[in-house]
Image: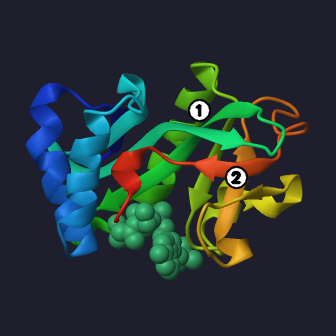
Amino acid sequence: METSIRPEQPSDIPAIHEVNHLAFGQAEEAVLVDNLRNSDAFIPGLSLVAVKEGQIVGHILFTKIKIKDDQGNAYNSLALAPMAVRPEFQNKGIGGQLIRSGLDQAKALGHASVIVLGHEHYYPRFGFVPAEKWNIRAPFEVPSAAFMGIELQEDALGNVRGIVEYDKAFEGV
Ligand SMILES: CC(C)(COP(=O)(O)OP(=O)(O)OC[C@H]1O[C@@H](n2cnc3c(N)ncnc32)[C@H](O)[C@@H]1OP(=O)(O)O)[C@@H](O)C(=O)NCCC(=O)NCCS
């Protein structure tokens, strides 16, 4: 049976919490998703679920961030975080489907770029490259290969540099 990707609906919220809790084996990311949903960083069309035979088997969230340079400029971007697939459905391509659909949807909504902190061998297959290419840095210590970005519009990051500022919901996670 096909897996379909669609924006979350209010009735999906408990299942999204469960998918995150199961995938990460702890509550932090599930709580983070709930907190981000109630924050200014939330974009309703960019919390996507993967549905298979009526069951929510995966989730991906893109939220608003700023990239701030030392001249006082602030640029809008998106963070991809977190994403989760139910353990028994992992390694079947569902994560990849969520990322591709999410990037397409973010582009269609006019967003310029996406930043992700994640596995350096996974995200490049979707077009992500180390964000150091644009002099975009994380606000915390992180291996540079794991901190990546992608342009959704041509040269969207060409004039952007600086430090990513996440929503305060991310603090402590
Ligand atoms: C990360 C995750 C969402 C990927 O979903 P998925 O449906 O299994 O992904 P896909 O089937 O599209 O791709 C699987 C591939 O990604 C690799 N991969 C993904 N995340 C990885 C990670 N954190 N570490 C190592 N490998 C990872 C797998 O090894 C596999 O590699 P291969 O294609 O070369 O064999 C899922 O594994 C998951 O929920 N993990 C737990 C939560 C988590 O770590 N989320 C990411 C951080 S926000």
For ligand 1, which image quadrant applies? Answer: bottom left
Nearer to me, 151 or 160: 160
Horizontal and vertical percent position of residue 8: 27, 32
Q: CA–CA distance between discs 1 and 2?
A: 25 Å
Tag 1 secondary structure:
helix
Q: At x 28% / y 53%, what residue is drawn?
A: 32
Q: Quadrant of the C terminus?
A: bottom left
Residue 143 quadrant: bottom right
Residue 22 quadrant: bottom left
**Visible residue check, residue 86:** no
Mark 1 or 2: in front is: 2
Number of other residues with Cα within 10 Å of mark 2, as a class: few under 14, some 14 to 19, many 20 or more: some
Q: Is residue 98 left or right of residue 21?
A: right
Q: Hey, what amino acid is under mark 1?
A: Asp
Horizontal and vertical percent position of residue 110: 64, 19
Query: Can you identify the residue that label 2 sits on?
Result: 163
Horizontal and vertical percent position of residue 133: 87, 58
Horizontal and vertical percent position of residue 134: 86, 52
Tag 2 secondary structure:
strand
**Visible residue check, residue 139:** yes
Query: Can you identify the residue that label 1 sits on?
Result: 104
Q: Hey, what amino acid is under mark 2?
A: Ile
Q: At x 62% / y 75%, what residue is drawn?
A: 142
CB under 8 Å between discs 1 and 2? no
